[in-house]
Image (spheres, helix red, strand yellow):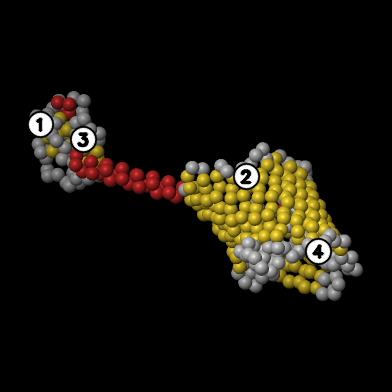
Amino acid sequence: MFSILAQGSRKREIWVPALPPVAETAPSIRSNAVVHVQRNTHRTAETFASRTAFWCNRPTSKNGGWLWGYNPRPLFSTLEKISMKKTLIALAAVAATGAAFAQSSVTLSGALDYGYQSTKAGATGVTTKGMGVDTSEIYVSMTEDLGGGLKLNARAGIEGLNRTQGFVDGLNHTIGLTGGFGTIYGGAIEIGSGIRGLAQAGAPVNNMEGEILGSAVDSDILKYSSPNISGFVFSGSLTEGNVGVNLANGFGKGLSAGNSRALTVGADYAAGPIKAKLDYTSWKNNAANDDRFRVAGQYDLGVAKIGAGFESADLVAGGKNKYTMLGVSAPLGAVTVGAVWVKNDNAGAKRVGYSVGASYDLSKRTSVSSSYSSWEATANAASKDNKFKVQLSHSF
């Protein structure tokens, strides 16, 4: 390999064929200004050969380093220009590709719980117990930067086999836009108790949905949330089919009462140790509910979290259906303990239940937990149902 130098240009190194034998010492040059031509070697020779001219990087050389002639034209200038053009094109392509990849991302997340559960029905004394999967879900979340501060967000979920379902099914699917105006999204989601999230206070217990609190239902939703304004986020949503599973028919006429639609407006607040939310919902074509008010809050004391929630719905048949929930949790190193108390008053028919539990964190994503729950399946039941559970959980 030679270091090819042309006067007035930068050094270039290229591979050249072996040169024919030449004298190691040019006859018209003093011995202390010898030009060495390296042959069949990988050592760099700071020598340029073109016709009968040589260039030697020695301060004592005459004519600015040129020997036997003045400034011969380099043989490789055209190749240098071509190589530089190719390099610039390659760099531009890499930069464009990198920018395209930076505009979008896909994230995989999910959770899996497996363990032992035993449930006893107080009225009949029947006990069911065994090993099984409690949670098995995978979510794919997608984000694309559309420019100008606008982003597209989408999420799709799949639910696997578990205790209550013997087949693979879909979970929440949403797609929406986020920008300076806030967030707007639409999709098909499962809506559970609106007070449990804060009222449970992070306690590692049975959430009591289906035991005392209302069970989660499937709904189509279109929702807008404002930007965060001093800790407040205001929202409005339109949902369809949240009684039964008749989705995508909330605006139809002459349909069954299950094809209902609901308009909800609300506000969430989060700042420092305080979290709170309230909302109001009005239904149309709903067989059970007319309207509903919910409020919930949570406070972090440092040594413990406490939560409370209340919900009241006016019934179409008259009267009110009320839910109350209180919760507490306390971290003790890697162990977290907690408890919740819940009550339902459905037009005078009252039911009460509670759940206590503890969890041990094996890592940030893996834990072992156990809980015990007891509740009245019917109003003023002579004996209560109960459930015991121990499980290994992992989220990713």
Of circles 4 and 1, which is in front?
4
The amino acid type found where label 3 is placed reads Leu
Which of marks 3 and 1 precedes in the sequence? 3
Vertical placement of 368 versus 165: above or below? above
Of circles 4 and 2, which is in front?
4
Vertical placement of 206 versus 331: above or below? below
User: Residue placed at 76% from the left, 60% from the top?
Assistant: 289
Percent of width and height locating residue 245: 66, 67
The amino acid type found where label 2 is placed reads Ser
Q: Quadrant of the N terminus?
A: top left
Cβ atoms at labels 2 and 1 below 8 Å apart: no
Which of marks 1 and 4 precedes in the sequence? 1
**On the image, numbered disc 3 is attached to which residue?**
5
35 displayed left or right of 251:
left
Percent of width and height locating residue 242: 68, 62
The amino acid type found where label 1 is placed reads Trp
**On the image, numbered disc 4 is attached to which residue?**
317
**On the image, numbered disc 2 is attached to which residue?**
226
Tell me how far mark 2 sits from mark 1, CA to CA. Answer: 80 Å
Q: Secondary structure at mark 1?
A: loop
Tell me how far mark 4 sits from mark 1, CA to CA. Answer: 112 Å
Which of marks 1 and 2 precedes in the sequence? 1
Of circles 4 and 3, which is in front?
4
390 displayed left or right of 365:
right
Of circles 2 and 1, which is in front?
2
Q: Secondary structure at mark 2?
A: loop
Cβ atoms at labels 4 and 1 below 8 Å apart: no
- 367 or 352: nearer the viewer: 352
Percent of width and height locating residue 181: 57, 43
How crowded is the residue under tag 3: few (<14 C-alpha within 10 Å), some, or many (20+)?
A: many
Which of marks 3 and 4 precedes in the sequence? 3
